[in-house]
Image (spheres, coloured by chain):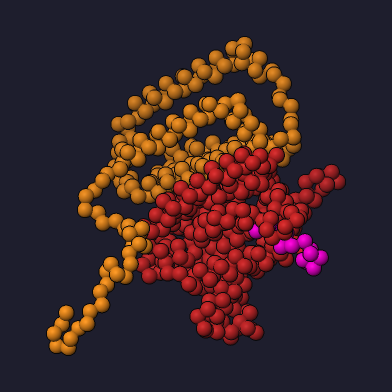
Chain colours: A orange, B red
Amino acid sequence: MIISTIAFYLFAAMTIASAFMVISAKNPVHSVLYLILAFFNSAALFVLLGAEFIAMILIVVYVGAVAVLFLFVVMMLDINFAELRQGFLQYLPIGGLIGLILLIELILVVSGWALSPEAIQVGSQVAPTVSDLTNTEQLGHVIYTDYAYLFQIAGMILLVAMIGAIVLTNRTRPGVRKQKIAEQVYRRPEDSMAVRKVEPGQGV
Amino acid sequence: MAEFWDIYLLPTLIIVGQILLIVLPLLLAVAYLTLYERKVMAVMQLRKGPNVVGPFGLLQPLADGAKLFFKETVVPTGANKVLFLLAPMVTFILSLIAWAVIPFDEGWVLADINVGILYLFAISSLGVYGIIVAGWASNSRYPFLGALRSAAQMVSYEVSIGFVIVTVLLCAGTLNLTGIVESQKGDLGLLNWWFVPLFPMFIIFFVSILAETNRHPFDLPEAEAELVAGYQTEYSSMAFALFFLGEYANMILMSGICTVLFLGGWLPPADWAIFTWIPGIIWFGIKIAILLFVFIWVRATLPRYRYDQLMRLGWKVFLPFSLLWVVVTAGFLVYFDMVPA
């Protein structure tokens, strides 16, 4: 018990610290690496909660795919760090204002949640009984039976977004010579070769 | 104090002992895999291979290790020092921690977790970080190009590996690796393993793990003819050795995953007494050795892919085909009511 408590505080503190480093690191590549560290620690928190499926999916999707592409893009950017820091004071007021608004909203939401009677009821409900299903199976049951339509709609939205992104970035450039593998495979010696009898001293 | 010993210290010591029991043979296997590779390639090319150090060149890996150990560690001036040294460690550690969930025999597994295969998928998808960070931190052109190539390559082939894993999971009905091996048990022995009903996926998986481990014919991240040594260009001494060990440990790991998913893990190929008498870990080792032989065979035989052909194969051939096969398998299982409970 005490080990899991220590582990919780360790991972939680690491998550917060690395999240702070994401916004305060001077080098954007370092920021992305700290972001990855934050993902890792949140995955560890999920494992402590007993939600190992979500923890693994978090790592596969966010760390294994999203953050790689993110790192990819950030590394390719040619950023002038001195120029970046010049604008700091200029953007400070508006940034601070946005931060303040977010903070007020958060306070409102959190305090409202703590005071509303329904929320207290939710909190006082008994935890659902532990079944012998693994949490992968439980998630499957919930997603594919109770929320099947919502799940399908979410999939459709992602598909539309994906197609939209491809349409927006796809340019058809004229004059590009592409390899057509099927054509190469179907090419026969007769199509491109001819056997000639060459007389000496005459050429073809 | 006795309680503290029983609850915390003893289990920790047992786990540390188990970890050593896995890691030490693994490192030995990695060392001798290099010799295996050189010997097999030598035979294929009608050469003798290493035969000077020790009997049949058996001490060659140790000599190579000692040579690397005594070399000077060079850190380029322009490099980002922390990340430069972190990258080989990441590669090496990732190739070792994945072994925690691999079942070597019935019950011979360090952590028998519910989501074993997802854990392996997660770890193998992290392998790209060692390479991409190494390429960036070296602050040099060739390593950076190698890192960019490998990032694109590994992300592309991971997608089809994911779909292949999904098909096997559909048939096995569990994410637990021991469960996946158990699901291949049957009267037919060899024919009961998943590589028979899912043969196309087995091929796709094997080609994808070639790409995932950056092996020939997909070794573009370190294509020596165009990129010097790719992301490893600036590395020397033990930092290079860690990359090298990590890469070879990854090859063994990927062969191990392939064995668990398709070749029945520790199961003998038939239920005959002489086969069942041989312990499961030997069968597991034999299957891995066969797959590694194919890795080397491919290296000795095929020329390197061009980069656009590599991308085409990943995205335009493997991805649609494996996606289709997931649908076909799922439809088949539902139609014939064969979905595992």
Say left or right for A85 vs B130: left
Which residue is most to the right?
Answer: B2
**Image location of residue B247, percent across then percent down:** 54, 63
Q: Residue at x 80, y 44 (%)?
A: B7
Q: Residue at x 14, y 88 (%)?
A: A201
Establish if B205 lies above or below A150: below
Which residue is most to the top?
Answer: A117
Say left or right for A181 vs B325: left
In the rendered image, residue B274 lying in the magenta stretch gets the answer yes
Establish if B134 lies above or below B46: above
Establish if B90 lies above or below A21: below
**Image location of residue A102, percent across then percent down:** 44, 23
**Image location of residue B36, percent across then percent down:** 59, 74
Q: Residue at x 67, y 42 (%)?
A: B338
Q: Is residue B230 visible?
A: no
- Residue nearest the observer in this picture, A122 or A2: A122
Say left or right for B137 vs B264: left
Q: Is residue A119 visible?
A: yes
Q: Please state, as top left, top right, bottom left or bottom right, where the N terminus of chain A lies in the image.
A: top right
- Residue nearest the observer in this picture, B2 or B162: B162
**Image location of residue B168, percent across then percent down:** 61, 49
Q: Residue at x 72, y 21 (%)?
A: A126
In the rendered image, residue B300 lying in the magenta stretch gets the answer no
Q: Please state, as top left, top right, bottom left or bottom right, where the C terminus of chain A lies in the image.
A: bottom left
**Number of numbered markers:** 0
Q: Which stretch did the figure color magenta? A: B263-278
Q: Main secondary structure of the magenta part?
A: loop
Which residue is most to the left?
Answer: A202
Answer with the quarter of the image where residue B225 lies. bottom left
